[in-house]
Amino acid sequence: MPSPRAKPAAYPPRAAPAAAPQVAERERAALGWLHTAHFLTSAPQLEHLPPLGLPEIAFVGRSNAGKSTAINTLTQQTRLAFASKTPGRTQHINLFGVGKQKVDDAVLADLPGYGYAAVPREAKLRWQRVMGNYLMTRENLRGVVLMCDPRHGMTELDEILLDVIRPRVQQGLKFLVLLTKADKLTRSEGAKVLSITRLQAGGGEVKLFSALKKQGVGEAAELLWRWVHPEGADAPAAEPEPPPQEDA
Ligand SMILES: Nc1nc2c(ncn2[C@@H]2O[C@H](COP(=O)(O)OP(=O)(O)OP(=O)(O)O)[C@@H](O)[C@H]2O)c(=O)[nH]1
Ligand SMILES: [Mg+2]
C-alpha cells in the first residue's frame, strides 16, 4: 500500500490572504477609471495635435502588435480604438480622454504602428520622423506602453524606440513593455520571453498581456493609474465603482 506523501520541505509559502483582495480592488478601480475613456481627437501629424495639459500615455509598437486591441481591452470598450487584422490600419495619432465624473485627468494616445513591410519607404520614413518627434518633444508625455508580439520579440525598431525615449526615462518618463498575444505562448515560452525582454528593455516594466484571455489587464491598468496619480497610488477610487462591463 503506498504510504501517504510527505509535504515537500521547501513548499512555497502562500501569499498573505489579506493582500489579494486589496490588489483586486485596486485593479478594479483602475479599470473603472480607464473605462471612462472617450474619443478626443485624431491627427495625421504631430503639429496637428492639440497641446494638452494632461498626462499622456502613448501606445506604440510594430504594426499589428495589438496596440488598438490593448486600448479597447484596458478600457473595456469594443470599438474605441480601431483594431484590425490588416496591419497598418491605424494611420493617425488618435487621442482618448480618461477621467472620473466627466473630468479628464489623462490622455491615451494610439499611435500608428511601424515596421510594416508593405508601406512605401517614404511613408515609413515620414512616420518614423513623426513618431520620433512626438516621443522626444511631446511635453505632457507621462508614459510609453511599447507593445511587442512575443513571437517576434523586441525588434531593431523597438530597440531604436527605447533608445529614443531613454534620455526622457532618466528624467522620469515611464515605460512598460507589454508582450501581447500571450495566449499564443505556452507557460514556459511566456516565462522565457519575459526574462529575455526584461534584459533587453533595461529598466521599466515588462508584462505578459493577452486581450483574448484577459491576462495582465488589471495589472497594466493599475500601473497606468499609478503613472498618472503618483501621489494617490494606493487609492485609485474613493467611491465604489461598479464592476467593469464587458461590451458584447
Ligand atoms: N490572439 C490574440 N490576438 C490579438 C491580441 N491582441 C490583438 N490581437 C489581434 O492582432 C491583430 C492586430 O491588432 P491591432 O490591435 O489592430 O494591432 P495594432 O498594433 O493596433 O496595429 P496597427 O494599427 O496596424 O499598428 C488583430 O487581428 C487582433 O485581433 C491578443 O491578445 N491575442
Ligand atoms: Mg492600431
Image: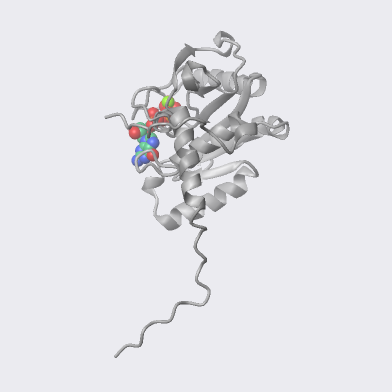
Q: Nearer the viewer, residue 60 or 220?
A: 220
Q: Quadrant of the C terminus?
A: top left
Residue at the far bottom in the pictured view? 1
Q: Quadrant of the N terminus?
A: bottom left
Q: Is residue 236 left or right of residue 35?
A: right
Q: Nearer the viewer, residue 92 or 223?
A: 223
Return the x and y of residue 215 as percentages of the image width and height. 41, 44
Q: Is residue 22 left or right of residue 160?
A: left
Is 75 above or below relative to 184?
A: above
Kindly identify the residue that appears in the image at 72 percent across and 34 percent down: 170
Q: Is residue 161 left or right of residue 124?
A: right
Residue 167 visible in image: yes
Total marks placed = 0
Kindly identify the residue that appears in the image at 50 percent across and 71 percent down: 11
Residue 93 visible in image: no
Residue at the far left in the pictured view? 248
Q: Nearer the viewer, residue 117 or 57?
A: 57
Indicate how the structure is coloured in the image: one colour
Return the x and y of residue 182 as percentages of the image width and height. 41, 45
Figure quadrant, ligand 1: top left
Is 205 above or below relative to 108?
A: below
Q: Nearer the viewer, residue 170 or 33?
A: 33
Return the x and y of residue 39 as percentages of the image width and height. 43, 16
Return the x and y of residue 152 as percentages of the image width and height. 47, 43
Kindly identify the residue that appears in the image at 43 percent across and 32 percent down: 74
Residue at the far front in the pictured view? 239
